[in-house]
Structure formats: structure tokens, C-alpha cells
Amino acid sequence: MKDAVVLSFGDVLIRESDFHLLNDGQWLNDTIIEYRSSISFALPPELNKCSVIFIPVNDNEDDASGGSHWSLMVFHRPSLSFYVYDSLNGMNTRRARKAVKKMTSIFGILADQFTVHIAPLFVEVNTPIQINFYDCGMYVVTITERLSERLAVRMNDIPDKPGDLSAWKISHSMSPQYVNDKRKEIANLIISLKRKTII
């Protein structure tokens, strides 16, 4: 059975099998998360100079695709803090801690800018809890959007004090229905972009 291409957007190729994951009751895969990130939060070429970096974390323990849970980690360079959002209440904590160890060298955290060896702070943020076992990827997307919107308005007001949660809390008004509506919004956006590329 042919898995037809629905949309080619930048470096992301969305196939029918990926697109169908936007239906209710489906887990998102890395293709959909990568697509959503690519249209809003493309990685800059010089990560070691970025103040804030969003990192989706999957619980997969090897390099093959797979895994069963997504969470979000946000690195805030000025406070040298990793803020972790997990919609299943810490299920991905061990994997996120492993990711922090890898990210410290990638982001240049322990490079020339610091005269002493300082370990980054790992902060688990109280996160809205999903009511099923398939919306974790949607929570990553939705929380990323919420934080991005907030940071766009008040980036200069973000405290540099490590562990200060004043800018990083997520409202528990992020209901399961709101997250489900985001799923539909992404599907509609893909359909809209597909129509534009055909014209």
C-alpha cells in the first residue's frame, strides 16, 4: 500500500500515515512535531548564542524511531536552567535528565562564557495532565506555543535567577478540549498548505 505524500514543507515530508495521526485518539510522531516546530520555531544555526531553546524529549532509549511518550524541555541560558514539562506527571524525568547531559555540550553551556564549572539547574514545572495516553505530543506542541507567545511579549522581563518559575508556569486552563482543538488546527493548516502548493 502506497503511503502518499500529503505535504512537503521545508525539510519535513508528511505522508498520509503521518497526517492520520492528527485524528482523535492517535499518538503524534516525530514528523508532526518536527513539522509544527519548523513552521514556528526553526532552530537557529548558532544554538550556543540562543537565550531560549525548546527541546521535545521522547522516552525512546535507542537511536531508532519509536518511543511512547513525549515531554518538553526548555533551556533558558541566562539562568542556566532546564525547565521540564511532562503531561504525565514526571513519566519522562529520567529521559529528560539524560537529555540535559547531552545538551550541555551541544549548547556550549560549559564553554568559555563561564569561568567556573556550573551544572545547569533541572526544574520540573507543574504541567496540565493529559486525560489519555496519546495526547503527550499535542501537549508538547501546545505548551511550546504558549511559552513562545509569552516570551515574544516579555523576553526582556524573564528573570535570570535559576529556578525562578514566574515566567515559566503554565496555566491549568489548558484544557483537554483546548489541546484537542490544537490537533484539528494543525490538520487544517496542513490541508491549507497542501492546497496552496497545488495551485
Image (cartoon, grey):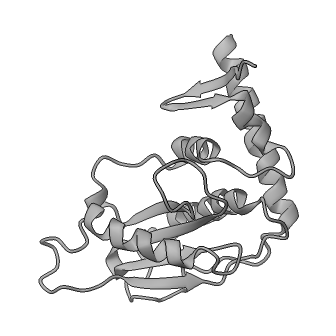
Q: Is residue 22 above or below residue 131?
A: above
Q: Is residue 168 above or below residue 152?
A: below
Q: Is residue 23 above or below residue 180?
A: above
Side (left or right) of 148 relative to 20? left
Residue at 61% over, 57% down = 67
Q: Quadrant of residue 4?
A: top right
Counting from the top left corner in percent of width and height, residue 113 is at 16, 74
Query: Residue extending furthest top?
Result: 199
Residue at 30% over, 70% down = 104
Counting from the top left corner in percent of width and height, residue 123 is at 50, 85
Q: Is residue 138 above or below residue 171?
A: above
Counting from the top left corner in percent of width and height, residue 90 is at 63, 80
Side (left or right) of 140 relative to 118? right
Side (left or right) of 87 relative to 115? right
Q: Which residue is more in the foreground, 59 or 181?
A: 59
Side (left or right) of 91 relative to 164? right
Q: Quadrant of the N terminus?
A: top right
Q: Quadrant of residue 78?
A: bottom left
Q: Quadrant of residue 174?
A: bottom right
Q: Which residue is more in the foreground, 146 or 16?
A: 16
Q: Quadrant of the C terminus?
A: top right
Counting from the top left corner in percent of width and height, residue 15 is at 67, 28
Residue at 76% over, 60% down = 135
How many numbered circles does the render carry? Answer: 0
